[in-house]
Image (tube, rainbow, N blue to C red):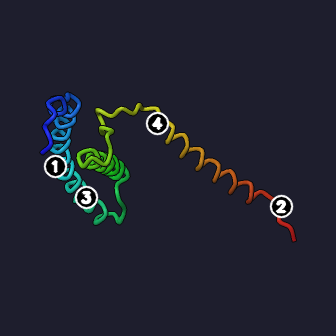
């Protein structure tokens, strides 16, 4: 039988991870409830206007990303803690926004150029 290594049991990083796993487990439960409520509210918007509410959709997407990040952390698929304890800085979010803006702008520019180009017969 293998011996139990006392140092492994007393490793502070493992107990910190356990604490965050419990914390995020409660957060997952709360976020799931909020997502269900938001889905019901979104359905009401859709029922009366045949359109969804963009701000609700944005909040729903953010909560869904938080939910996925939390589940990945709790299930040991990643070691990166989700928001608000994430190790990533806000620069990565800003980079994604700039990249998206550039793609959209380039697409619009190419569409404009193609519509302005003289048609050859």
Residue 59 visible in the snapshot: no
For marks 4 and 2, give the CA distance.
41 Å
Can you identify the residue that label 4 sits on?
A: 92
Pointers 4 and 2 in contact (CB under 8 A)?
A: no
Pointers 3 and 1 in contact (CB under 8 A)?
A: no
Q: Does label 3 or label 1 sit earlier along the sequence?
A: 1
Left or right: residue 21 compared with residue 107:
left
For marks 3 and 2, give the CA distance.
49 Å
Q: Nearer the viewer, residue 13 or 104?
A: 13
Q: Does label 4 or label 3 sit earlier along the sequence?
A: 3
Can you identify the residue that label 3 sits on?
A: 39
For marks 4 and 3, give the CA distance.
28 Å
Can you identify the residue that label 1 sits on?
A: 29
The nearer-to-camera label among 1 and 2 is: 1
Q: Quadrant of the C terminus?
A: bottom right
The nearer-to-camera label among 4 and 2 is: 4
Q: Does label 4 or label 2 sit earlier along the sequence?
A: 4
Q: Nearer the viewer, residue 91 or 44?
A: 91
Using a 10 Å C-alpha cutoff, classify the residue at mark 4 as few (fewer than 14 neighbours), some (14 to 19) or many (20 or more): few
SS for dot 2: loop
For marks 1 and 2, give the CA distance.
59 Å
Could you tell me residue 64's position as x and y percent? 30, 51
For marks 3 and 1, give the CA distance.
16 Å
Q: Which residue lies furthest to the bottom in this view?
A: 121
Q: Which residue is drawn at 80% across and 58% down?
A: 117
SS for dot 4: helix
């Amino acid at each position: 039988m293998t011996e139990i290594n006392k140092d492994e049991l007393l490793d502070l990083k493992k107990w910190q991870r356990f604490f965050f796993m419990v914390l995020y487990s409660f957060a997952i439960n709360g976020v799931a409830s909020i997502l269900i409520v938001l889905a019901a509210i979104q359905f009401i918007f859709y029922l009366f206007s045949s359109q969804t509410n963009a701000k609700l959709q944005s909040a729903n997407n953010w909560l869904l990303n938080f939910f996925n990040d939390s589940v990945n952390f709790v299930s040991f698929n990643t070691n990166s803690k989700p928001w608000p304890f994430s190790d990533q800085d806000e620069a990565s979010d800003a980079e994604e926004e700039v990249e998206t803006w550039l793609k959209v702008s380039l697409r619009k520019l190419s569409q404009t150029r193609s519509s302005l180009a003289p048609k050859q017969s």
